[in-house]
Image: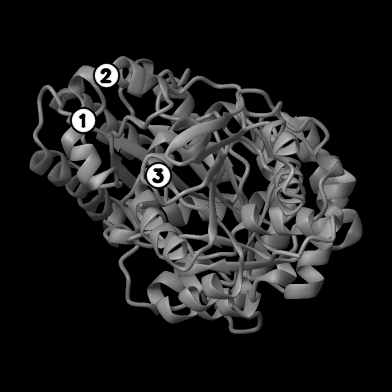
């Protein structure tokens, strides 16, 4: 039986904290469940020689890559085809732009949409040389003799997420990730999809609905991850973890009931939290929240269809800090129509809100998004083909700023905020706020006093990790990109 290699192509710059890729491990689990031989390789933790060896040892090579890295995926597919392999591309970009892969001449197939069910179907049909069965695989597009011979619509979204097997983390070496990320980060997801209409998000893969896993399944997986791998922190990779607050209260209750002790991080929106929820999350181990603000200008928030107000942003940040949780925020500069006055509004909101870390990127209209459809006339297609996208530059030709000016705006926003954040006045304010927090939460106050006296060891945190590497929290290039 042919053996399949599933690979994740490394970014040209590793901007996010390094952790095991969940998508590959879910696909690997589904292939194992069907007794199909599979190997997983994450290019971020292997060298080129190991990557080439893995390609040469397998028969069917499946690729996954983020939009900025599709050129590298095509280059690896070229190598695989030179070795006589069958090549297939999946993931969000392939779901909206199959042509860039099939037209390259280095891919035999593209598999659009969620592939946990369709990839095993395709591999069984391919193994049996059954063209009819292959032609019926939802989401499959393929070429023969440079001609499209199958091009099926993406499958319906998977409704019952609990029926998916737990990710096959054993197929990738967790210790390799931990060596490269001293914080020992692990990923878990509890939902798929996002119902909001931000114009810059590709939604073809997970959809605009909101599908959830059961509390039992989520906490069973958490318990397995914590007891098996002992991660330093768990990041819930949901787009909006707290969209349905009741289920997060239930999850926190179950974590506390089982006595699971671990730190975790949530991604969410400013209008999807309240103070009781934040306090409950903190009791259950939440120590960081990542918020997608994008801007502090109401005009820009409306352009991006964030459905948020600056007042909601500021209030969420204040509640988060009061609950004892550290906040990182994502911002975008260079959105359509943005002016220096809008930048000033964002900087004003930053100072009112006082988040702990800021990441800023340049507006990028991705194919398959509303921003792509609405602003094609302002996209330099030649630039896009040569460079594709990254967090610090864009093929979007802005009305008021050139690329150099946007890059300076991106950097200066972070530098300016850092100077303010670490000023004596803000340090004194945060000390006062922490004191109020410890009065309201005496259990944590006792722990903090114990650390001050050397009686309790310091907690694991991203801040200590960054400082141990000599990296400024606010000016590191790794911390200046978009969400």
Left or right: where 244 falls relative to 63: right
Earlier sequence position, callout 3 versus callout 1: 3
- The residue pinned by badge 2 equals 375
Q: Residue 474, how many percent across, how many down?
A: 31, 57
Q: Are marks 3 and 2 in contact (CB under 8 Å)?
A: no
Please identify, in this view, whether the residue under mark 3 or under mark 1 is nearer the observer: 3
Earlier sequence position, callout 3 versus callout 2: 3
Q: Are marks 3 and 1 in contact (CB under 8 Å)?
A: no
Please give the name of the residue rendered at 91% of the width and 55% of the height, measured from the top-left corner.
257
Q: CA distance from mark 3 to mark 1?
A: 16 Å
The C terminus lies in which quarter of the figure?
Answer: top left
Q: CA distance from mark 3 to mark 2?
A: 18 Å
Earlier sequence position, callout 1 versus callout 2: 2
Q: Is residue 406 above or below residue 181?
A: above
The N terminus lies in which quarter of the figure?
Answer: bottom right
Please give the name of the residue rendered at 87% of the width and 62% of the height, measured from the top-left corner.
259
Q: Residue 478, how many percent across, how many down?
A: 34, 60
- Kindly indicate the quadrant of the structure image that contains residue 241: top right
Q: Are marks 1 and 2 in contact (CB under 8 Å)?
A: yes
The image's mark for residue 67 is 3
- Kindly indicate the quadrant of the structure image that contains residue 449: bottom right
Please give the name of the residue rendered at 32% of the width and 39% of the height, measured from the top-left corner.
351
- For the residue carrying disc 3, how many other residues have a C-alpha within 10 Å: few (<14), some (14-19), or many (20+)? some
The image's mark for residue 132 is none
- The residue pinned by badge 1 equals 396
Q: Closest to the observer: 89 or 462?
A: 89
Q: Residue 333, how many percent across, how many down?
A: 25, 34
């Amino acid at each position: 039986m042919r053996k399949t290699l599933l690979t994740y192509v490394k970014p040209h710059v590793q901007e996010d904290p390094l952790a095991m890729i969940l998508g590959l491990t879910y696909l690997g689990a589904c292939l194992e469940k069907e007794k199909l031989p599979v190997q997983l390789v994450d290019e971020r933790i292997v060298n080129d020689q190991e990557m080439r060896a893995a390609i040469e040892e397998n028969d069917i090579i499946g690729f996954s890559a983020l939009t900025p890295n599709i050129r590298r995926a095509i280059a690896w597919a070229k190598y695989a085809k030179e070795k006589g392999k069958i090549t297939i591309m999946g993931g969000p970009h392939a779901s909206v732009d199959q042509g860039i892969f099939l037209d390259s001449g280095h891919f035999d197939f593209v598999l659009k949409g969620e592939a946990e069910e369709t990839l095993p179907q395709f591999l069984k049909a391919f193994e049996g040389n059954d063209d009819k069965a292959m032609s019926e695989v939802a989401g499959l597009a393929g070429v023969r003799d440079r001609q499209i011979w199958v091009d099926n619509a993406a499958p319906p979204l998977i409704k019952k997420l609990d029926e998916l097997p737990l990710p096959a983390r054993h197929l990738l070496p967790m210790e390799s990730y931990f060596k490269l990320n001293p914080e020992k980060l692990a990923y878990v997801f509890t939902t798929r999809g996002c119902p909001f209409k931000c114009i810059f998000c590709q939604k073809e893969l997970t959809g605009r609905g909101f599908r959830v896993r059961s509390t039992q399944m989520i906490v069973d997986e958490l318990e397995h991850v914590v007891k098996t791998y002992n991660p330093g922190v768990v990041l819930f990779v949901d787009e909006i973890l707290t969209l349905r607050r009741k289920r997060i209260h239930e999850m926190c209750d179950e974590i506390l009931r089982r006595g699971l002790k671990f730190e975790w991080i949530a991604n969410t929106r400013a209008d999807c939290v309240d103070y009781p929820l934040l306090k409950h999350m903190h009791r259950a181990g939440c120590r960081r929240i990542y918020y997608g603000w994008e801007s502090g200008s109401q005009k820009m928030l409306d352009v991006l269809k964030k459905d948020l107000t600056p007042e909601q942003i500021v209030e969420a940040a204040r509640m988060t800090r009061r609950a004892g949780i550290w906040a990182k925020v994502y911002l975008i500069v260079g959105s359509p129509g943005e002016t220096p006055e809008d930048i000033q509004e964002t900087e004003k909101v930053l100072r009112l809100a006082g988040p702990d870390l800021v990441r800023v990127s340049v507006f990028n209209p991705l194919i398959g998004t509303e921003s792509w459809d609405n602003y094609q006339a302002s996209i330099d297609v030649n630039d896009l083909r040569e460079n594709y996208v990254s967090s610090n530059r864009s093929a979007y030709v802005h009305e008021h700023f050139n690329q150099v000016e946007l890059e300076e705006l991106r950097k200066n926003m972070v530098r300016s905020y850092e100077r303010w954040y670490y000023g004596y006045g803000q340090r004194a304010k945060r000390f006062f706020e922490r004191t109020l927090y410890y009065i309201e939460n005496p259990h944590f106050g006792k722990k903090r006093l114990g650390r001050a006296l050397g009686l309790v060891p310091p907690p694991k945190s991203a801040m200590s990790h960054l400082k141990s590497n000599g990296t400024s929290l606010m000016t590191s290039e790794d911390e200046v990109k978009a969400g």
